[in-house]
Amino acid sequence: MIDILLVDDQKILLEGLRKIFEPAPDIAVCATCALAELAEEACLRYRPDLVLMDICMESRTSGIRICRRLKERFPAIRVVMMTGMSELAFVGWAKDAGADSFIYKEASGEAFLDCIRRTMAGEHVFPVIRGRDTFGAAEASLTERELEILQLVCQSLSREEIAARLGIAKRTVNFHIANMLEKTGHRSIVGLAVEAAEKGRTSMETEDECERDDTAMP
C-alpha cells in the first residue's frame, strides 16, 4: 500500500484527490495538510511513502522550499510537486528542490495514479515533449518546428531563449506558439503540454523552485 500525504490549501482539490485515490486498491491517503509549514510535522507523525504537494500556497513558505526540507530530512519519502499555474519554469524549480516527479493539476485522475505508481517504482516523471501526435479536439497535427518549440517551452526556456537556441526571431516563436494554440484549440501552451504528457509523449527526468515568501523566486 502506498500511503500519501496531500498538501494543498484548496479544500476542493484535497477532496477531489481523495475521490480519485479511494477506488485504487494500492493507494491510501493517510493525511491531508492545508499549510506547507505543517508538512514536516505530518511526515513525522504519519510516515507517508509519498507527499503530493502544491508548489504555491497561501502561506509564507513555498511548497518548493518545503520539498527541499523534506528531501533532506526524509530522503526515503518520495515527493511529487503539482501546480495549476501556467508557469513552465516550475518544472525546473521542482527538480532543483529534489522533487521526484511533477504533475499539472489539469491532468486526469488516471495520470495522477500513474504518476504516483511510477514514482514509487523509482521513476522520475516530468513533462518533456517529444514525438508526433495529434492534439486538441480537432486532432490537429503539429509540424516538426512546432514540436521542437513545444519541447523547449517544456524545458522552461523563455521565448527569447528559444529564439536564440533555434536561431530565429522571437516573433517567429510567438507565431508558432499562437499557431499551435489556434490549431489545437488550447487556451495556453501549458494545456497543450499536459495533453501531450497524458498521451504518453513524455520522457521521465528531473529539475528547480517557486519561492512564495517575501523574497522572490530563485
Image (cartoon, rainbow, N blue to C red):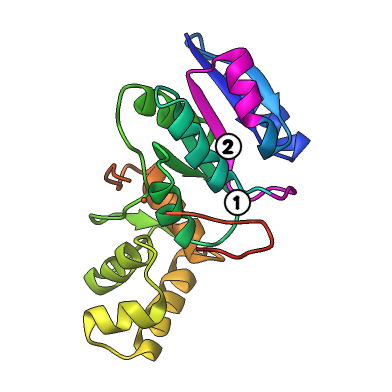
Q: Which residue is mark 1?
A: 84
Q: Position of residue 47 (x, y in %)?
A: 55, 15
The amino acid type found where label 1 is placed reads Gly
Q: Residue at x 30, y 26 (%)?
A: 122
Q: Position of residue 211 (x, y in %)?
A: 58, 56
Residue type at mark 2? Met
Residue 78 is a magenta residue = no
Point 65% across, 24% down: residue: 41
Give the farthest residue toward the front: 73
Residue at horizontal 69%, vertical 47%? 57
Sooner in the amino-acid sequence: mark 2 or mark 1: 2
Q: Which residue is mark 2?
A: 53
Q: Nearer the viewer, residue 139 or 88?
A: 88
Query: Is residue 18 shown above or below 27?
Result: below
Which residues, given as a range, are shown in magenta?
39-60
Residue 21, percent across and down? 58, 20
Q: Is residue 34 left or right of residue 91?
A: right
Kind of element beneath mark 2? strand
Tell me the SS state at disc 1.
loop
Regarding residue 22, the answer to whether it shows in the image is no
